[in-house]
Structures are given as C-alpha cells and as structure tokens.
Image (cartoon, helix red, strand yellow):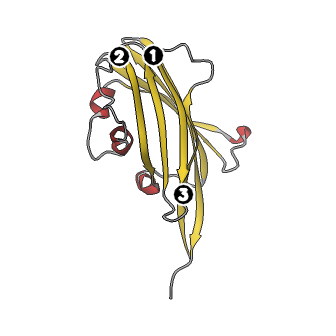
Amino acid sequence: MSQKKKVVIRSLGQCKGQQGLPMIWYDFASKHDDKTGDITASIKVRNKKEVSKDFSIVFNFWKCDASGNPDSCEQVVKDYNVTDICTFMVAKGELWSRFMEAFTTPLECPIKPGLYEAKDLKIAPDFLNYMPVGDALWKVQMDGHDRGKKVSCVYLVIQIVPFYVKRRT
C-alpha cells in the first residue's frame, strides 16, 4: 500500500467580525465527484470600492494537529507582508495560479467594484509537493491592505488527510 494525501477545505470566507470591509468573500462551496474523486470549489467576492495597484496582503499561518483541537495550534508564520501582490495575482504557472484563473471575471489590479466568482476550482493535492506539510489542519488568515488601509480579510481552514491506496499486483 502507498500513502497519498487529500486536501479538504473546511472553510473559506470572510473573517469573523470583518463584514464592513470593502471586499467581502462569501458563498464558499465544495463538491466531491464520486466517479472521479475530484473535489471542486467555488466562492464569490463582492468588491465595493476600487482597490489600487498598491494592494498588499499580510499572511498568518497556524498549524494544528489533525484533529483541529485549538489547543494544538501553533503559529508558524506571523505577519508575513507581501507588497507586490498584484504581480503575483496574474503570474502563470504558480502554486496559486489555478485559484486566480478560476475567476469568471479576472481578479486583477486595480480591482474594480463588482462581483467576482471563482467556479469549478479543482482542489488537488499536488501543491503539497512544494510544502513540507504532514497530516495537519492549517488555518490561514490573509489581511488585504490598500495604501495602508485594510480592505479585505480572508480566513481559510485546510485539512491534510492521509489515505492508503492498494497497489495492484
């Protein structure tokens, strides 16, 4: 038997208590295709105010044991600020490109007011090849800023689940 890993998005959306920001993330849904085993996801973003090319994101990561017990969580990345996020948003062939390309209207800077939808985003464990992650529950908070003012807050919870595949002989 060989071990593989599956990625399960437990939640993705607006940070609690942050509904008054100009960018609101909502209606996250994921689907599992029983025939192919594929997992796809969708989410909507409503932007109420133009976000300039000075958009930046501050990342915070917590790693918890596989049970997700809050007492087991340890912050592994604190206040990692990425200032050239607009360049990254349109980059091709990157870890996050699949997510950005799932938007039906391109999410690129300056981000105009409107509704943006990511649809049929395939959630594949291949990104785990780039990261030294074991079986765990990961919590990520991304605070978006435009010219020093907070405009977005996204909270993501991902679980890495191992499973065994029987080898054919």
Residues 63 and 99: in front is: 99
Q: Residues within 10 Å of mark 3 (few under 14, many from 20)?
A: some
Q: Amino acid at mark 2?
A: Val
Give the numbered dot on residue 151. Answer: 1
Q: Quadrant of the N terminus?
A: bottom right
Q: Earlier in the sequence, mark 1 or mark 3?
A: 3
Does 32 sit left or right of 122 as displayed?
A: right
Label 1, label 3: how far apart the Cα atoms are = 32 Å
Task: Tell me residue 150's x, y (percent).
Answer: 46, 14
Element under disc 2: loop
Q: Amino acid at mark 1?
A: Val
Q: Residue at x 35, y 14 (%)?
A: 50
Q: Is residue 161 above or below residue 93?
A: below
Residues 68 and 63: in front is: 68
Task: Tell me residue 152's x, y (percent).
Answer: 47, 20
Task: Tell me residue 3's x, y (percent).
Answer: 55, 68
Numbered label tally: 3
Quadrant of res 126: bottom left
Element under disc 1: strand
Contact check, label 1 and label 2, Cβ < 8 Å = yes
Residues 56 and 168: in front is: 168
Does 166 sit left or right of 149 as displayed?
A: right
Residue at label 2?
51
Q: Earlier in the sequence, mark 1 or mark 2?
A: 2
Q: Earlier in the sequence, mark 2 or mark 3?
A: 3
Q: Is residue 119 visible?
A: yes
Residue at label 3?
6
